[in-house]
């Protein structure tokens, strides 16, 4: 996080607390969440994307405390399941600022969304249009505002598992096949739902702007066809996916630059197409929460495999950060609890799970005197780490500890082995 410093002993300081204090107080592994950093980034996106609706994509990391922070910063919220909606309800997140996603929303989920009165539902399929059509009569006077998710046919420059707008993936209505146009026609024709506009989400951890520009152009062209026929489609949602720097080589686009590019492009395209300019929306998750999180681990073993590499095993692993195994994600690591003058060596940070794929940091350097008991910090773990955490080998999930102004508090408590045993019916 941008607020990180170091103390006189060479220990990393987060939110005014040294990692040594945090580890003593809360144990390891622990996700440390820098509250000021998160609030600052919410505010920065809100400012940079002035005139847009900015939906925080709660899937990146959701807890009641962080939802309150996002709400206070003026962000809206993207939820994609009944569970995520329940968290939003638990903090009384204003319903009109909630947008609901999901490629296979159940009737119950849609009913929960209508019942709470969410501001937008992003419809992903014809089956869902049917489900909504059947539900609406159960909510007298309600005419749900919807967006249609369009598969724009752009292959985002990111890992295959998180590219979501080419044809060969499950999300949305296909643009090239004509499905998207058919969906628009159907909604405009049946009058049950209020079509606010179109949506696309091209993928995640995208560093450049080209994919977003291509997606916006395609959405605008599709939209213009209907606007010229007299339809009113006041909104255009370009989804999330803005990348962050995990390692020094990553150069993400700054939010101000992204906003500028999108604003200019949309104004220009609309002028060329001869149609009105829609209100824009974005749905950043990772770019808001990612940099605020740092995972702290304690080293348990160090194995030097002569001529191969050094394996540093920590007390967590793929259960608290599955991204390295799942997406080949790159992370960095640093010795966090003390200074060291020892020369650097190439290491692989691995976990404690019974799986050779249990890697946290594939390649980085640590001082060669790294030893059991040392604290290690892996930055950039605020998004999609706690939210993707699992219990392989019956390992309890770590807590999320928010730090601010020299104090710490668990915003998500540490899971215990008793919690795990309690789910087992014996
Ligand atoms: N909007 C929609 C419709 C999405 O599906 C997503 C993410 C977002 C917004 C937020 O995307 P972001 O700004 O966070 O990139 N588990 C993967 C990421 C999956 C993203 C899924 N959808 C990972 O750890 O990389």
Image (spheres, rainbow, N blue to C red):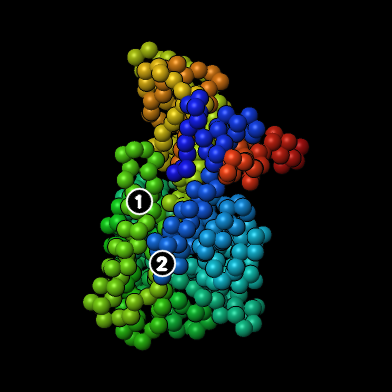
The image shows residue 246 at horizontal and vertical percentages of 39, 40
Using the rendered view, name the quadrant where residue 284 is placed. bottom left
Using the rendered view, name the quadrant where residue 180 is placed. bottom left
| In the depicted structure, whether residue 376 falls above or below residue 102 | above
Q: Residues within 10 Å of mark 1 (few under 14, many from 20)?
A: many
| In the depicted structure, whether residue 18 falls above or below residue 88 | above
- Which residue corresponds to the image point at 45% horizontal and 67% vertical from the top-left? 53
Q: Name the residue at the bottom extreme.
A: 230
- Which residue corresponds to the image point at 38% horizontal and 25% vertical from the top-left? 365
Q: Distance of mark 1 from mark 2, alpha carbons?
A: 21 Å
Left or right of 262 in this view: 171: right
154 or 70: nearer the viewer: 70
- Which residue corresponds to the image point at 48% horizontal and 32% vertical from the top-left? 6
Q: Is mark 1 within 8 Å of ligand 1?
A: yes
Foreground: disc 1 or disc 2: 2
Q: Is mark 2 within 8 Å of ligand 1?
A: no
Left or right of 404 in this view: 219: left
401 or 231: nearer the viewer: 401
Report the residue marked by disc 1.
206
Residues tagged 1 and 2 counted as in contact (Cβ below 8 A): no
48 or 201: nearer the viewer: 48
- Which residue corresponds to the image point at 76% horizontal and 37% vertical from the top-left? 426
318 or 106: nearer the viewer: 318
| In the depicted structure, whether residue 60 falls above or below residue 322 | below
The image shows residue 354 at horizontal and vertical percentages of 54, 27
Tag on residue 215? none
Report the residue marked by disc 2.
50
Which type of secondary structure does the marked residue at label 1 adopt?
Answer: loop
The image shows residue 249 at horizontal and vertical percentages of 31, 39
Is residue 306 visible in the rendered image? The answer is: yes
């Amino acid at each position: 996080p941008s607020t990180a410093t170091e103390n006189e002993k060479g220990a990393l300081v987060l939110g005014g607390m040294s990692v040594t204090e945090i580890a003593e107080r809360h144990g390891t592994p622990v996700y440390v969440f820098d509250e000021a950093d998160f609030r600052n980034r919410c505010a920065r996106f809100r400012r940079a994307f002035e005139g847009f609706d900015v939906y925080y994509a709660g899937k990146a990391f959701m807890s009641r405390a962080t939802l309150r922070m996002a709400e206070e910063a003026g962000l809206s919220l993207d939820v994609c399941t009944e569970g995520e909606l329940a968290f939003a309800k638990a903090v009384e997140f204003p319903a009109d600022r909630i947008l609901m996603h999901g490629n296979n929303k159940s009737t119950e989920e849609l009913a929960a969304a209508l019942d709470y009165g969410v501001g937008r539902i992003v419809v992903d399929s014809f089956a869902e249009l049917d489900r909504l059509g059947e539900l609406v009569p159960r909510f007298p006077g309600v005419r749900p505002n919807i967006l249609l998710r369009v598969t724009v046919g752009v292959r985002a420059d990111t890992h295959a598992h998180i590219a979501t707008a080419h044809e060969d993936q499950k999300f949305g209505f296909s643009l090239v096949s004509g499905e998207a146009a058919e969906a628009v026609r159907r909604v405009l024709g049946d009058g049950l739902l209020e079509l606010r506009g179109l949506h696309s989400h091209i993928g995640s951890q995208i560093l450049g702007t080209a994919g977003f520009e291509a997606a916006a152009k395609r959405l605008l062209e599709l939209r213009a066809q209907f606007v010229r026929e007299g339809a009113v489609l006041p909104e255009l949602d370009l989804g999330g996916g803005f990348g962050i720097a995990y390692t020094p080589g990553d150069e993400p686009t700054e939010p101000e630059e992204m906003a500028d590019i999108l604003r200019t492009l949309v104004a220009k395209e609309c002028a060329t197409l001869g149609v009105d300019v829609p209100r824009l929306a974005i749905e950043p998750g990772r770019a808001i929460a990612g940099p605020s999180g740092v995972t702290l681990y304690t080293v348990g073993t160090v194995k030097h495999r002569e001529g191969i590499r050094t394996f540093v095993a920590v007390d967590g692993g793929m259960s608290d950060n599955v991204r390295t195994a799942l997406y080949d994600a790159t992370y960095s690591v640093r010795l966090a609890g003390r200074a060291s003058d020892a020369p650097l060596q190439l290491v692989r940070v691995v976990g404690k799970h019974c799986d050779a794929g249990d890697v946290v940091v594939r390649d980085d350097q640590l001082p060669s005197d790294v030893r059991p008991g040392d604290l290690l910090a892996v930055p950039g773990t605020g998004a999609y780490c706690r939210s993707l955490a699992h219990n392989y080998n019956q390992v309890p999930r770590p807590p999320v500890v928010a730090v601010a102004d020299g104090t710490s508090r668990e915003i998500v408590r540490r899971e215990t082995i008793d919690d795990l045993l309690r789910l087992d019916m014996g």
